[in-house]
RNA sequence: GGGCGAAUAGCUCAGCCGGUUAGAGCGCCUGCCUUACACGCAGGAUGUCGGGGGUUCGAAUCCCUCUUCGCCCACCA
């Protein structure tokens, strides 16, 4: 491997040429490895700081959402690593039960087979093989964007260790009575052939039809009375085959007489009772609701209350068919085997034919869909395993209320609280093959209670007979909700990692899995560890295209981060997404124009590279003195100014990052929603490096870097110090290029094997007296001259003479002195030679007033059109006069002077002094230039 | 149905616990290959801060209301 130090800087930044080597160097240096023994929790002298990655699904290739998510985490963990924490970022992948199974099933379908053709064992084996490849790919992709994970701790939700932990959690909850077997209506996906949790059945708005159907009254003698009876309204007529009653509200006078009588269920041709239940809303539809207990969760509750039968009239695949042993039969022969939606149409047609369809109206409602395959979910009565959530939610709710766990941005706080307050039991069993098999065994011989066990059972503990394990697997989220604990060694309480790094610190994620994952992790943390899993939840925005659509594979509007890395480098990708992402705000990128989308990052990285090229080419090879060794008196105004600006930048970055952790356990009102403003941090660092260091300091330093310059050593020392600090500041967001440059920078006293990734975060230096302010005056003068040159279209190469006039006593005299002393800077940056004079020469045309009561005057005779210039000046004076009037009337307003805070009043007074001086000078200028015209 | 968020320069967005003449990046215009950088340098233009009302000495910022988008939650069939 070619060490990056040995090669010269290429004229053009070539990320592909350096990124790999730098990543390998970090690995070789062990930069990302966290040592549990150094954790303060185990008596070490480093405060631990831990992030666990939201494990990407093994099926996925890295997409922009990951690019964003991982970059945020990497910025934070690199920041803490440099700040001296024992920083640990745990990587890993999720077996993603249903998602992965779908992928393999699709592969099989392409071969014309189903999972049932290959069998459970072979299916799982095939999936494992698939996962071995894709799981490794995504970890490789993480490295490509610079993720500083501790790869020695890579975890996988379906590994033997984590599987053991999952089983432990299941058994403990079962023993506490928090896991139970429930017989109820759940969400069923007839394509995935599994039940789903409430969260996995997503609402999607749809325009449906509300069918009004006539159920005729059954007279006492069994004959029908078509005149009497009820009309029910339903959006799912096919479920009427499972109707066991119709319900009316007990107070509803319209139907009171019918209660207890029977109506005839059409198609199935069965008489069913009219019952009274307060669930019915008299104001909706006809005020009569059909009761289908096996296919509607509300109807199920009604069915329980009234002890009604609960016939299932649909198969798991969504075809109409009576469940075995159902009596009486309900699905007519001609409908048996019909798809549920085809059956709907046919039933509606049949009803219409019999004049039982009273009317149909369009109806806007939300229909639940499978979150993996978007099939319409069918409510269905079945036996499933559930976790009782209310007891788990209580401490997790309190933790967020109290501030032990904070959620950023603030607006997600209330969302979390609301969900937790209304939490419902969690269906954790899935009728899939890919996942953690439920650790429950049944004995057919003795037929006793099921056996829940940490160890695999081969015979019944009660009777010694044969046992069979529950066929189902656990919801994939049942393993990920334990992630912060299990990746650190839980349930082994003596695990060194667990003691050293749990609780972790920040959890970074998109808001879409707040309930699926984050809320549940908080619950499991308190349940199993008695402690929060993390103190901060940072929810970032999601990647969208220019139409605001979420990037997705199916829409084909995604961006492959690796394409971006190939084109512009990992740093350009990282910089662009972090700089463009306000707290919790979505990032818009154009998949059809990567060049345009990533221009900010590409330009910045190129700029940084070129600053490095200039410095390394001009600083030379001689040793550079540490800044502290320099005589402070030798610092120029520019030196003091850039050092002061560096301090300001460090302070602003620190403020943007905020506190790494709550100071005494809980976040306070003040700290709760502060910090982790990564875009502000990035913008500050950019501004410092580009607009301050490069645009000003590097330019002024060019005068001093020539071989014979007397204070070349001072300039070199300051440049190295400042650039070193700048690279440290920038490293979390653009790690590759900063490392590459830092390695080549001749930093005094740096060990040969040091890497920037583990170098210390910069801290503020000290006080610099008046010098920075004086340099600011020089900048003001440069700007003023540049503007005048531009206004009067002076040829860029032409040097001009500028007269400095003091108009304001001592302060002005000081300013004149400063500008005279800094003539070299003015010459380089403004191509102006300056001289002081007692007053402006009469023929001088262009004036610029500077702070300190100093005026710059440029003789422009012969260069300008006097008439136009006079008109321009007159207009400028008029505008200034208007603003001045407004300002003065404010200052004379008693309510303002009485009520506004003193510093505001003082600022306005200072402004008034400044403006009136400008006004006076403008008047003078007009008089001298335009008098008599 | 309930809740939340957004609306600021042509585009993407900062700013928002009230207080300089409202900012950045990209784009645009003018001039520059000034020995690190044209992925650059210098200068410049562009905003009734979504509409209306209110509170205040002062509102992009706080309150009310309307409009338009977006998100989350939800067992009215």
Image (cartoon, coloured by chain):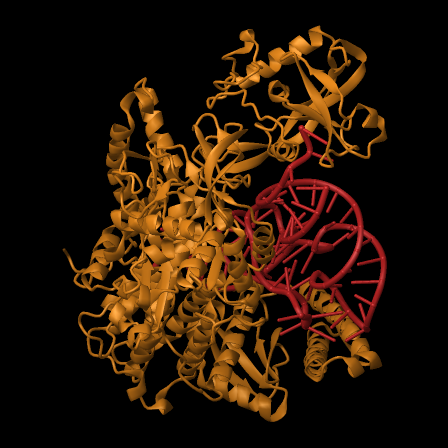
Chain colours: A orange, B red
Vertical comparison of A507 with A83: above or below = above
Q: Residue at x 43, y 55 (%)?
A: A524
Please identify the quadrant where the N terminus of chain A is shown. bottom left
Vertical comparison of A612 with A427: above or below = below
Q: Residue at x 49, y 86 (%)?
A: A818
Q: Residue at x 45, y 76 (%)?
A: A645
Residue A245, given in percent of the width and then of the height, sits at 68, 24
Residue A156, given in percent of the width and then of the height, sits at 30, 48
Q: Quadrant of residue A269?
A: top right
Note whether residue A893 is visible. no
Which one is nearer the viewer's eye here, A876 or A464?
A464
Q: Residue furthest left?
A: A1
Q: Quadrant of residue A52?
A: bottom left
Q: Residue furthest bottom?
A: A810
Which one is nearer the viewer's eye here, A429 or A456?
A456
Q: Is residue A853 left or right of residue A549?
A: right
Please identify the quadrant where the C terminus of chain A is shown. bottom right
Which one is nearer the viewer's eye here, A98 or A868?
A98
Residue A845, given in percent of the width and then of the height, sits at 62, 73
Q: Is residue A691 left or right of residue A51?
A: right
Q: How many marks overall?
A: 0
Note whether residue A507 is visible. yes
Which one is nearer the viewer's eye here, A805 or A303?
A303
Residue A901, given in percent of the width and then of the height, sits at 72, 81
């Amino acid at each position: 491997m070619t060490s990056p130090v040995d090669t010269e800087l290429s004229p053009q930044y070539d990320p592909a040429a350096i990124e790999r080597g730098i990543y390998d160097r970090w690995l070789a240096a062990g930069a990302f490895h966290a040592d549990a023994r150094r954790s303060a929790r185990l008596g070490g002298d480093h405060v631990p700081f831990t992030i666990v990655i939201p494990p990407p699904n093994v099926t996925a290739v890295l997409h922009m959402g990951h690019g964003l998510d991982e970059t945020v985490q990497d910025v934070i963990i690199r920041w803490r690593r440099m700040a001296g924490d024992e920083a640990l970022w745990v990587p890993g992948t999720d077996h993603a039960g249903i998602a992965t199974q779908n992928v393999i099933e699709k592969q099989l379908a392409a071969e014309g087979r189903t999972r049932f053709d290959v069998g459970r064992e072979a299916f799982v084996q095939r999936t494992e093989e698939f996962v071995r490849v894709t799981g490794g790919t995504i970890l490789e992709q993480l490295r490509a964007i610079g993720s500083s994970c501790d790869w020695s701790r890579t975890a996988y939700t379906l590994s033997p260790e984590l599987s053991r932990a999952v089983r432990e959690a299941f058994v403990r909850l079962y023993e506490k009575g928090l896991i139970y077997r429930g017989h109820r209506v759940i969400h069923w996906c007839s394509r995935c052939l599994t039940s789903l949790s409430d969260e996995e059945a997503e609402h999607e708005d749809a325009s449906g039809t509300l069918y009004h159907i006539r159920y005729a009254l059954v007279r006492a003698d069994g004959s029908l009375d078509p005149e009497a009876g009820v009309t029910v309204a339903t959006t799912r007529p096919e479920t009427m085959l499972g109707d066991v009653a119709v319900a009316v509200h007990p107070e509803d006078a319209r139907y009171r007489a019918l209660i207890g009588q029977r109506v005839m269920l059409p198609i199935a041709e069965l008489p069913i009772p009219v019952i009274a239940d307060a669930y019915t809303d008299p104001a909706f539809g006809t005020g009569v609701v059909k009761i289908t207990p096996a296919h509607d969760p509300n109807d199920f509750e009604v069915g329980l209350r009234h002890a009604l039968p609960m016939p299932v009239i649909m198969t798991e695949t969504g075809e109409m068919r009576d469940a075995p042993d159902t009596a009486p039969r309900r699905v007519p022969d001609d409908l048996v085997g019909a798809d549920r939606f085809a059956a709907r149409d046919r039933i509606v047609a049949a009803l219409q034919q019999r004049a039982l369809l009273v009317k149909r109206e369009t109806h806007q409602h939300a229909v639940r869909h499978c979150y993996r395959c978007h099939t319409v979910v069918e409510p269905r009565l079945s036996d499933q395993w559930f976790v009782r959530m209310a007891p788990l939610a209580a401490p997790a709710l309190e933790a967020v209320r109290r501030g032990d766990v904070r959620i950023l941005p603030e607006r997600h706080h209330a969302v979390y609280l609301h969900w937790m307050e209304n939490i419902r039991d969690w269906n954790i069993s899935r009728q899939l093959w890919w996942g953690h098999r439920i650790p429950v065994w049944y004995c057919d011989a003795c037929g006793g209670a099921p056996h829940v066990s940490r160890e695999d059972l081969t015979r019944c503990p009660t009777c010694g007979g044969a046992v069979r394990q529950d066929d189902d697997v656990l919801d994939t989220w049942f393993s990920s909700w334990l992630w912060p604990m299990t990746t650190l060694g839980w349930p082994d309480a003596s695990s060194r990692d667990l003691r050293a790094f749990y609780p972790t610190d920040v959890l970074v994620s998109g808001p879409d899995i707040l309930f699926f994952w984050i809320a549940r992790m908080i619950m499991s943390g308190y349940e199993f560890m008695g402690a929060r899993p993390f103190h901060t939840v940072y929810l970032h925005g999601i990647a969208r295209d220019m139409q605001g659509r979420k990037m997705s594979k199916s829409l084909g509007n995604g961006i492959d981060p690796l394409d971006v890395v190939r084109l512009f480098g990992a740093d350009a990708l990282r910089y662009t997404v972090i700089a463009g992402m306000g707290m919790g705000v979505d990032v818009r990128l154009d998949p059809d124009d990567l060049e345009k989308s990533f221009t900010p990052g590409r330009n910045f990285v190129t700029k940084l590279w070129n600053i490095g090229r200039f410095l390394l080419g001009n600083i030379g090879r001689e040793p550079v003195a540490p800044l502290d060794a320099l005589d402070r008196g030798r610092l120029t105004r520019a030196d003091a100014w850039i050092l002061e600006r560096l301090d300001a930048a460090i302070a602003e970055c620190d403020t943007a990052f905020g506190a790494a952790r709550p100071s005494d356990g809980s976040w306070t009102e003040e700290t709760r929603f502060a910090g982790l403003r990564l875009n502000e941090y990035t913008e500050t660092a950019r501004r410092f490096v580009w607009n301050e260091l490069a645009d000003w300091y590097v330019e002024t330093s060019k005068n001093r870097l020539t071989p014979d310059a007397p204070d070349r050593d001072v300039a070199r020392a300051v440049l190295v110090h400042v650039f070193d600090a700048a690279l440290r500041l920038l490293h979390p967001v653009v790690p590759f290029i900063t490392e590459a440059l830092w390695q080549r920078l001749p930093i005094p006293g740096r060990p040969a094997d040091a890497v920037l990734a583990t170098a210390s975060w910069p801290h503020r230096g000290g006080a610099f007296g008046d010098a920075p302010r004086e340099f600011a005056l020089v900048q003001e003068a440069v700007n003023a001259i540049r503007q005048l040159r531009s206004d009067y279209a002076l040829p860029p190469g032409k040097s001009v003479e500028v007269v400095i006039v003091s108009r304001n006593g001592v302060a002005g005299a000081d300013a004149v002195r400063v500008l005279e002393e800094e003539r070299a800077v003015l010459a380089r940056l403004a191509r102006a030679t300056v001289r002081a004079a007692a007053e402006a020469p009469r023929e001088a045309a262009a004036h610029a007033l500077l702070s300190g009561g100093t005026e710059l005057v440029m003789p422009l005779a012969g260069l300008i059109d006097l008439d136009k210039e006079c008109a321009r000046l007159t207009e400028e004076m008029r505008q200034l006069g208007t603003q001045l009037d407004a300002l003065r009337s404010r200052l004379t307003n008693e309510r303002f002077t009485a009520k506004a805070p003193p510093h505001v009043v003082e600022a306005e007074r200072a402004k008034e002094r400044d403006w009136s001086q400008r006004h006076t000078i403008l008047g003078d200028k007009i008089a001298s230039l335009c008098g008599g015209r």
